[in-house]
Amino acid sequence: MAATAPKITEYEIDVQDVEYLRHGDSALLARLFKPRGSGPFPALVELHGGAWCLGDRLNDTTINERLARNGILVAALDFRLPPVASYPASLADINYGIRWVKSQAEKLGTRPDAVCTFGISSGGHQAMLLGMRPQDSRYSAIALAGGAKFEASVRGVIMGSPVIDPIGRYRYAKQLQEKGNPPAFVDLVLPLHDKYWLNEAAMDEASPVQILERGERVATPPVLYIQDVRDIVHPRAQLERFVELYRKVGGQVDLELSEGAAEAFMSRNAPPALRDMHEKRDSSSSRASSVLEKMVSFIHTQTR
């Protein structure tokens, strides 16, 4: 008799927007996707992509809902973007957001020691950079009222097609532009790199690949790295160099590299400029489900 597949619990969820941080008259919101149940559930701080300049907390609603239905509390953050503020402002907001989730853990139905991060494209870069530098004084500069005991280290980082080497991607796009007739993404990302980073020195200073190349001491939370093998927007060589260097310093990296992996992150909520940055492909529900299952397993494993 065939073995019976394990029962998977699918939770009803509640969704709400809350203010987690304020700069003057401007409120930054977190969209919370909360499983109904006694918990405590693992928590995931989600960071939208958009070449550091586009998008908001609504970009990845579809995948955040699915994660929440699998028993994960998701906090999708808004953070400051140009022209309001350039690097490192978004990192300071996100670092605060991670600490805020920890400080609200009991109310939200999670635990302070059960927080991971997840980001796509530039959001993946920011998740990894903060994972490696959770106590950097620039990123932790915003005080959390009554929350001095909380810091921004995380139990795991999930990256979907991250800009893992901003300076490397910038120079790669420049080279494609100089050759003439570049792919469509080039004319989009180059001015956005300039708008957020302001100069190449900042791109280099805050590149996870270059940080490891320089031998800086970093935190090494476990990583789930997801990328489509057909991806030309996020160079494969930079992925491979990050994985090599991160493992060399003792970090764990689980790779999900496959044709169709990117379909898991396709979203109707993203601005057209973000959708157009990638070639249009037929979505694959089976691939999306497989990637989601790996994400859910990774989060639950790292937060036990």
Image: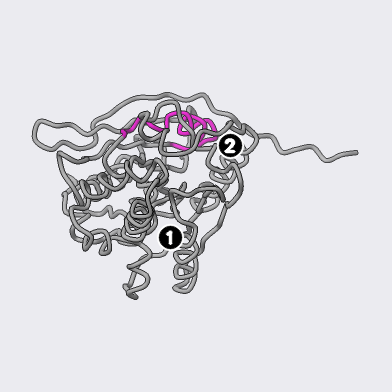
Question: Is 69 in the magenta?
Answer: yes
Q: Residue at x 36, y 72 (%)?
A: 213
Tell me if I can see residue 153 in this picture: no
Question: Is 62 in the magenta?
Answer: yes
| Vertical side of 54 occupied by 132: above or below | below
Q: Do the residues labelled 2 and 1 touch (CB within 8 Å)?
A: no
Q: Which residue is drawn at 55% across and 51% down?
A: 301
Seen from the viewer's position, the closer of residues 68 and 86 is 86
- Quarter holding the N terminus is top right
Residue 94 lies left or right of residue 106; in this view the side is: left
Q: How crowded is mark 2: few (under 14 residues within 10 Å), some or many (20 or more)?
A: some
Q: Name the residue under label 1.
A: 221
Residue 289 lies left or right of residue 125; in this view the side is: right
Q: Residues within 10 Å of mark 1 (few under 14, many from 20)?
A: many
- SS for dot 2: helix
Where is residue 151? Give x, y as percent.
28, 55
Tell me if I can see residue 68 in this picture: yes
Seen from the viewer's position, the closer of residues 300 and 82 is 82
Q: How has the structure been colored for display? A: one colour
Seen from the viewer's position, the closer of residues 89 and 303 is 89
| Vertical side of 14 occupied by 39: above or below | below
Q: Which of marks 2 and 1 is in front?
A: 2
Q: What stretch is highlighted in magenta?
A: 55-73
- SS for dot 1: loop
Q: Name the residue under label 2.
A: 288
Q: Residue at x 49, y 37 (%)?
A: 279
Seen from the viewer's position, the closer of residues 21 and 201 is 201
The residue positioned farthest toward the right in the image shown: 1
The residue positioned farthest toward the left in the image shown: 24
